[in-house]
């Protein structure tokens, strides 16, 4: 095959975030497997920066493992016009096609990038875009849809219903989905089966040789009691406030030493009294091995988010041998739990209480759920499995079998 060009609005080895990390890992593992890959991106620093400011120098750069990065200047944008339309999307208001055009043209964009793609497209087998809602994806796919593959990371949100996407995305050559429910949503919105776009439910690759040390976590952080673990960003968008509320009610109703341990960035208001008496412990950022040790030591991981396209922390918890508890309103995580038989799900406080009681009182069954989850991850998301699936899919889509 010729080169595979991965296109993302911004790129750096250290940028956190789901789509950024997914691209970094996919590109790196394909690179190690001998696939020629490049990253095409803007000079913008990151999501939370000014999308008109070219932080990086344009031109060629290299990742830590030697993959070529091609950076292109971002164009000056009308932030006020974009923000006005984006506010309508966020509030659920009706948006006209003309306003959709403002949204897509006044976000992060690079005409220099699109010109490069057009001029050099014969050097590439495919252009792979991630995620779906940015200008670099929409305007990039328009350059050569017949060579375009998306890793869209679709959610059931207002942006997914943009009419311009419905006009363009069915013309793309391929779609790579992180989970079955995402593929079902995409089919409902864009009818890819009718357009001939090739699709695959890929998932996200995992390093599956995780070895947790629960005793080391308990010793380092002086936690002897049973605990529920939350790992990830702490904000209302992740529904962590619901977990805190339900946990607070649970210990009010039960004679128990159970703790709630939170790890990860962000801030959320916590009950002062429960923090003071050590019932809720917010450890903030911890290093990777400490995270694995925490996952191995927990009774279970609770992932309360209602809006996930995957969930690395769920997979990590299973690799550490522990079950998970997820929210029933998240189709993706509930589907993972059902497919793997690796945990339970809840929709209200009393279901949370019942699930917690069950896993605390049925330790052997909880262990079995964790074991089921571990087998599920190794069978479906080990990097050796994912790399072969990507190589096969790219060959099929490009016609270079």
Image (tube, rainbow, N blue to C red):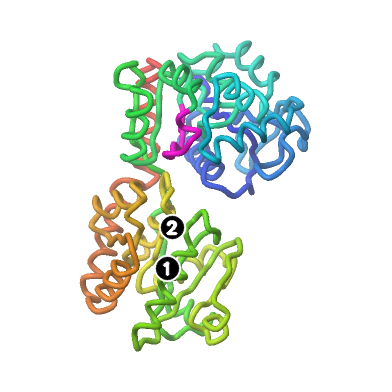
- Where does label 2 land, which residue? 313
Residue 392 seen in the figure: no
Q: Is residue 112 above or below residue 21?
A: above
Asked if the magenta segment contains residue 153, the reply would be: yes
Residue 344, relative to residue 175: is it above or below? below
Q: Secondary structure at mark 1?
A: helix
Q: Is the residue under label 1 in contact with that under label 2 (CB below 8 Å)? A: yes
Could you tell me which quadrant the N terminus lies in?
A: top left
Give the x, y percent position of residue 152: 46, 33
What's drawn in magenta, residue-wise?
150-161
Q: Residue 214: percent from the left, percent from the top?
A: 42, 75
Residue drawn 40% across the image and 71% down it: 246
Image point 48% across, 15% down: which residue? 145
Mark 1 highlights which residue? 295
In terms of sequence position, does the residue under pointer 2 or pointer 1 come before the other?
A: 1
Q: Identify the image quadrant of residue 386.
A: top left
């Amino acid at each position: 095959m010729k080169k595979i060009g991965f296109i993302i609005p911004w790129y750096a080895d250290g940028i956190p975030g789901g789509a950024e990390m997914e691209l970094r890992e996919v590109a790196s593992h394909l690179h190690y497997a001998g696939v020629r890959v490049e990253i095409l991106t803007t000079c913008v620093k990151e999501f939370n920066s000014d999308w008109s400011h070219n932080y990086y120098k344009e031109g060629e750069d290299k990742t830590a493992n030697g993959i070529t990065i091609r950076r292109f200047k971002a164009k000056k944008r009308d932030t006020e016009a974009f923000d006005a339309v984006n506010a309508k999307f966020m509030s659920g208001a009706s948006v006209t096609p003309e306003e959709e055009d403002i949204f897509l043209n006044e976000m992060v964009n690079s005409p220099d990038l699109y010109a490069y793609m057009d001029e050099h497209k014969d050097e590439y087998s495919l252009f792979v875009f991630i995620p779906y809602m940015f200008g670099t994806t929409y305007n990039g796919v328009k350059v050569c849809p017949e060579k375009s593959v998306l890793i869209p990371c679709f959610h059931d949100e207002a942006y997914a219903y943009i009419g311009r996407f419905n006009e363009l995305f069915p013309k793309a050559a391929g779609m790579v989905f992180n989970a079955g429910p995402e593929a079902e949503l995409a089919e409902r919105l864009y009818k890819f089966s009718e357009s001939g776009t090739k699709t695959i439910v890929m998932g996200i690759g995992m390093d599956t040789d995780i070895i947790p040390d629960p005793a080391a976590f308990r010793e380092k952080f002086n936690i002897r009691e049973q605990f529920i673990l939350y790992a990830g960003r702490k904000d209302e968008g992740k529904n962590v406030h619901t977990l805190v509320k339900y946990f607070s009610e649970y210990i009010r109703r039960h004679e128990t030493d159970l703790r709630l341990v939170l790890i990860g960035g962000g801030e959320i208001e916590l009950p002062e009294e429960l923090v003071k008496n050590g019932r809720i412990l917010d450890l903030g950022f911890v290093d990777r091995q400490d995270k694995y040790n925490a996952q191995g030591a927990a009774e279970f991981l609770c992932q309360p988010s209602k809006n996930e396209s995957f969930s690395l922390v769920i997979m990590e918890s299973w690799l550490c041998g522990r079950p998970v508890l997820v929210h029933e309103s998240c189709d993706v995580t509930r589907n993972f739990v059902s497919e793997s038989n690796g945990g339970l799900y809840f929709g209200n406080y009393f279901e949370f209480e019942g699930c917690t009681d069950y896993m605390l009182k049925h330790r052997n069954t909880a262990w079995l759920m964790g074991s089921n989850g571990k087998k599920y991850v190794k069978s479906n998301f080990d990097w050796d499995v994912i790399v072969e699936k990507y190589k096969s899919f790219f060959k099929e889509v490009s016609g270079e079998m």
